[in-house]
Image (cartoon, rainbow, N blue to C red):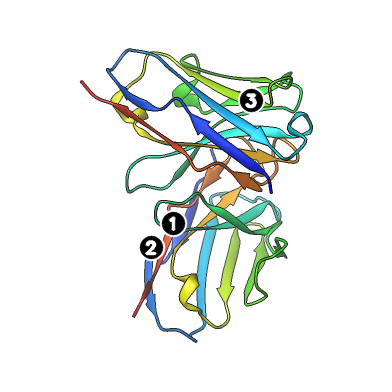
Amino acid sequence: DIQMTQSPSSVSASVGDRVTITCRASQGISSWLAWYQQKPGKAPKLLIYVASTLQSGVPSRFSGSGSGTDFTLTISSLQPEDFATYFCQQTNSFPITFGQGTRLEIK
Amino acid sequence: QVQLVESGGGVVQPGRSLRLSCAASRFTFSSYAMHWVRQAPGKGLEWVAVISYDGSDKYYLDSVKGRFTISRDNSKNTLYLQMNSLRLEDTAVYYCASSNNWNDVFDYWGQGTLVTVSS
């Protein structure tokens, strides 16, 4: 199975800050990497797929990069609605696996 | 607006069975692969199973293989998860989710249904 490791596990930031979350795969997954946002009590929401393609309707302050084993999600200027938990996901091979999540909290 | 609505969750004793349903509306259900994903309380996301658009292919997480069965009825726009021999560690919110292909990202999700396995 491919293990996905996110860092940090949690981060505190302020509105307007730039935040970067990283995700590392235990083996190469090409660009088969997606990012999801989850708010408490809600289902996850797809933000980015194939490492860097923004899902329709997602604000342009979100961006993704990387390939192979190392990936990043960047939020260029945090907005109040961005405080949530973020998960990476690999779809290169079964079983599909997720990172453990990064909780983004208000400082 | 695509809608996926799960039902069938509840409290069940270890070793017993439960069947979850996911009713789809406002999209062409029969054209999409469908997944079950679970999330234990306060934990991360865990993919459970996938079924191809026509039901001909299925994959499972190793820890549920032989105990859980994913199926679909395209005439009813409904996805199912039959869960047998439930264990304490199966306690989670179970989400259904759709994808364009069976190894693609999950673009639509239901709101989830809670399964609690407890004696």
The image quarter in which residue A46 lies: bottom right
Mark in front: 2 vs 3: 3
Asked if the residues shown at circle 2 and circle 3 are in contact, with their CB atoms under 8 angstroms apart, the answer is: no
Dot 3, how many residues are within 10 Å of its Cα: few (below 14), some (14-19), or many (20+)?
Answer: many
Please report contact status of discs 1 and 2: CB closer than 8 Å, yes or no: yes
The disc numbered 1 marks a residue on which chain?
Answer: A
| Residue picked out by circle 1 | A101
Front-most of residues B12 and A98: B12
Q: What secondary structure is found at the residue carrying circle 1? A: loop
Amino acid type of the residue that numbered disc 2 sits on in the rendered structure:
Ser
Q: Residues within 10 Å of mark 1 (few under 14, many from 20)?
A: many
Looking at the rendered structure, the kind of residue marked 3 is Thr
Residue B83 in the image, given as x and y percentages of width and height: 45, 18
Chain to which mark 2 belongs: A
Which residue lies at the image location 66% right of the left edge and 50% below the top edge? A29
Callout 1, which amino acid? Gly
Which residue carries the number 3 mark? Answer: B78
The residue wearing badge 2 is A9
**Position of B29 relative to B43 (above/below):** above
- Residue A23 as seen in the image, left or right of residue B52: left
Q: Give the residue drawn at x 51%, y 79%.
A: A79
